[in-house]
């Protein structure tokens, strides 16, 4: 591989706090070559041998990013959770280095706006995202819930009464609610992709996709 060239499986992670460490270790488990830049020498040493490469340095310093040849990484994750200033400076350094896909953890809505303005491509707010997800799951029909930035969600849910004993064509979920039943899973059986002739039973689990507000309307049905 020539100097400065990229490989798709390389990821640069900034920060080894709980969020950064979890991301780095999982990326490594998934087969990515992970390089981490960590300011705290103790943390950096702790992860030696567990991640492909650990660099002891302050990513808010443009020189550290330059020395790490950050521009060769196709993906970078800014996981700094202790300082908005350090996070923004590190992200700005990655933008300047030309990293094509930058993910960053935001500590607040204001932090998220700054990250967006400087050119970060994907902004994650773990506490807010988790809170919204839990709110949808507690006491409701939904068993799992994933929401995307554009107001689109995929959920796992129990079937509404009006669908039980009918095929999807008969219950007309899509035309009534504007969402799509992607799949159905019966207890003890494999997941199957849904088709109009798929019949829903009371014990089935539905996988439903569509606009968040419309899914919420379906989930509110008895």
Image (tube, grey):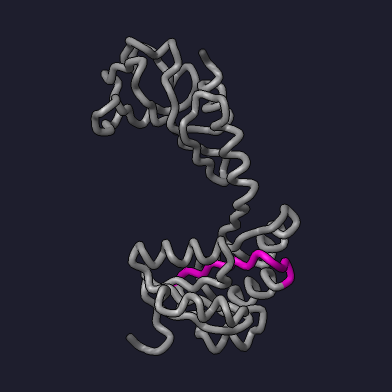
Residue shown at 40%/15% (left/top)? Answer: 172
**In the rendering, at what x and y percent does residue 206 appear?**
38, 26
- Residue 159, compared with residue 53, is above or below; it is above
Residue closest to the eye, 42 or 3: 42
Please check the rendered image and state whether residue 81 is part of the magenta-colored stretch, yes or no.
Answer: yes
Residue shown at 32%/15% (left/top)? Answer: 201
Q: Is residue 35 left or right of residue 109?
A: left
**In the rendering, at what x and y percent does residue 17 appear?**
58, 66
> Could you tell me which quadrant the N terminus lies in?
bottom left
Please check the rendered image and state whether residue 120 is part of the magenta-colored stretch, yes or no.
Answer: no
**Hey, which quadrant is residue 207 in on the image?**
top left
- Residue 136, compared with residue 66, is above or below; it is above
Residue closest to the eye, 150 or 193: 193
**Hey, which quadrant is residue 162 in on the image?**
top left
Q: Is residue 38 left or right of residue 178?
A: right
Magenta segment boundaries in residue numbering: 74-85
Residue shown at 72%/53% (left/top)? Answer: 109
Q: Is residue 57 left or right of residue 35?
A: right
**Hey, which quadrant is residue 198 in on the image?**
top left
Q: How many marks?
A: 0
- Residue 54, compared with residue 110, is above or below; it is below
């Amino acid at each position: 591989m020539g100097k400065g060239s990229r490989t798709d499986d390389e990821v640069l992670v900034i920060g080894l706090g709980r969020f950064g460490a979890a991301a780095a270790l999982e990326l490594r488990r998934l087969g990515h070559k992970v390089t981490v830049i960590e300011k705290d020498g103790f943390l950096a040493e702790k992860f030696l041998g567990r991640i492909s490469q650990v660099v002891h340095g302050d990513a808010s310093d443009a020189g550290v990013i330059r020395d790490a040849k950050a521009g060769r990484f196709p993906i970078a994750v800014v996981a700094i959770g202790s300082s908005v200033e350090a996070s923004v400076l590190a992200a700005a350094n990655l933008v300047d280095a030309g990293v094509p896909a930058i993910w960053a953890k935001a500590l607040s809505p204001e932090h998220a706006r700054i990250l967006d303005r400087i050119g970060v491509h994907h902004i994650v707010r773990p506490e807010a995202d988790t809170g919204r997800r839990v709110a949808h799951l507690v006491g409701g029909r939904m068993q799992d819930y994933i929401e995307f930035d554009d107001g689109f969600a995929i959920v796992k849910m129990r079937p509404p009464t009006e669908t039980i004993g009918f095929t999807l064509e008969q219950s007309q979920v899509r035309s009534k609610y504007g969402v799509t039943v992607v799949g159905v899973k019966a207890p003890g059986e494999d997941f199957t992709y849904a088709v109009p002739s798929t019949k829903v039973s009371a014990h089935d689990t539905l996988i439903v996709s569509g606009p968040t507000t419309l899914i919420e309307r379906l989930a509110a049905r008895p």
